[in-house]
Image (spheres, rainbow, N blue to C red):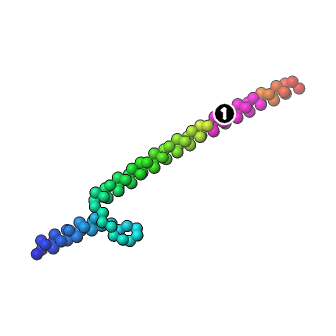
Amino acid sequence: MNHTLVLAACATVALAACVKMPDDGAFAFQTAAERLDAAADVAVQGETADGQGDAIDGQGDAIDGQGDAIDSQGDAIDSQGDAIDSQGDAHR
């Protein structure tokens, strides 16, 4: 009799481990394999999101590089303007 109770308790615990409470409050049966598959899907989604973040960072770096190039061109134009001003001052 005791063995039967122990086996029944173990079966109940094992079954409870496979039952998941979704957000809507209804019970859904989910095997360990299904849980592992869902976890793998989440991991893949995380890797995909990480890759997208890296791509966005790369685009930001490229835009920063373009901004630096424009700043350099502006500095060169300022220098040319200063040189022209100096020439004008020398001719006065």
Across and down, in percent, residue 74 comes to 70, 35
Residue extending furthest toward the bottom: 1
Along the line of sight, the residue nearer the viewer: 86 or 59: 59
Residue at x-position 37% and y-position 67%? 22
Q: Amino acid at mark 1?
A: Ser
Residue at x-position 13% and y-position 72%? 4
What is the magenta range? 67-81
- Dot 1: element: helix
Q: Quadrant of residue 86?
A: top right
Against 28, residue 58 (above or below) is above
Residue highlighted by disc 1: 72
Inspect the magenta stretch and tell me whether residue 47 lies in it: no
Inspect the magenta stretch and tell me whether residue 80 lies in it: yes
Residue at x-position 12% and y-position 71%? 3
Along the line of sight, the residue nearer the viewer: 41 or 70: 41
Across and down, in percent, residue 18 comes to 28, 64
